[in-house]
Amino acid sequence: MTKIGIIVGSTRPGRLGPQVARWVEKAAGERDDAEFDLVDVADYNLPLFDEPRSPLLRDYQHAHTRAWSAKVAELDGYVFVTPEYNRSIPGALKNAIDVVYHEWNHKAAGLVGYGSTAGGARALEHLRGIAGAVMLAPVHTEVTLSMHNDFENYAVFNPDPRHEGALRQMLGEVIALADALAPLRGT
């Protein structure tokens, strides 16, 4: 069965990503056409790109990189949950993407962003470009959440119900594209 990782992309203390990721996970749990796994970048304690060799070589020297590599490799697609920090994605997410390469190739990506000014849309645009560089294929539908409208007091996630349709659509697109790309992954 297709396996999709829901990746929490922020490691900042007090981050809101886990709340958003659980919302995604709840909607994903209503599906029977894929398995979903909540993956928190913070759990992998990835230091800033500390491998001595390029990830293109897959010659990882550090246990934290090997653990991250194994997790990314076992999944067929991803839903990235990211805040917008200074009009882009958090450094921790960029680093998590950069430390491995082949593990991302020919897989689907769904994007969920949240932020103060544009609901995370600028971060998602940056993430689309980054995804292309590691041969990830982002789907068309994305979810953008406003810190003003979808969070109570900027702290408690309470999404507007109108986002649920986009979330379901995006999940369906991720699964369909992950399945379509399977021959390129050799699975």
Image (tube, grey):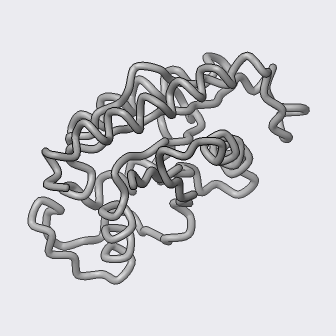
The N terminus sits in image quarter: bottom left
Closer to the camera, 101 or 185? 185
Closer to the camera, 154 or 165? 165
One can see residue 76 in this view:
yes
Q: Is residue 39 above or below residue 120?
A: below
Q: Residue furthest left?
A: 57
**What x and y, as percent, mark residue 141?**
47, 20
Residue ID at (57%, 31%): 113
Q: Residue furthest right?
A: 153
One can see residue 134 in this view:
no
**What x and y, as percent, mark residue 71?**
39, 67
Q: Residue furthest front?
A: 32
Residue ID at (24%, 71%): 51
Closer to the camera, 35 or 54? 35
**What x and y, as percent, mark residue 176?**
36, 33
Closer to the camera, 167 or 114? 167
176 left or right of 92 in image: left
Q: Is residue 64 above or below residue 144?
A: below
149 left or right of 57 in image: right
Q: Is residue 117 above or below residue 170?
A: above
The C terminus sits in image quarter: bottom left
Residue ID at (57%, 57%): 38
The quadrant in which residue 75 appears is bottom left
The quadrant in which residue 40 appears is bottom right
**What x and y, as percent, mark residue 46?**
43, 68
47 left or right of 182 in image: right
Residue ID at (22%, 40%): 181
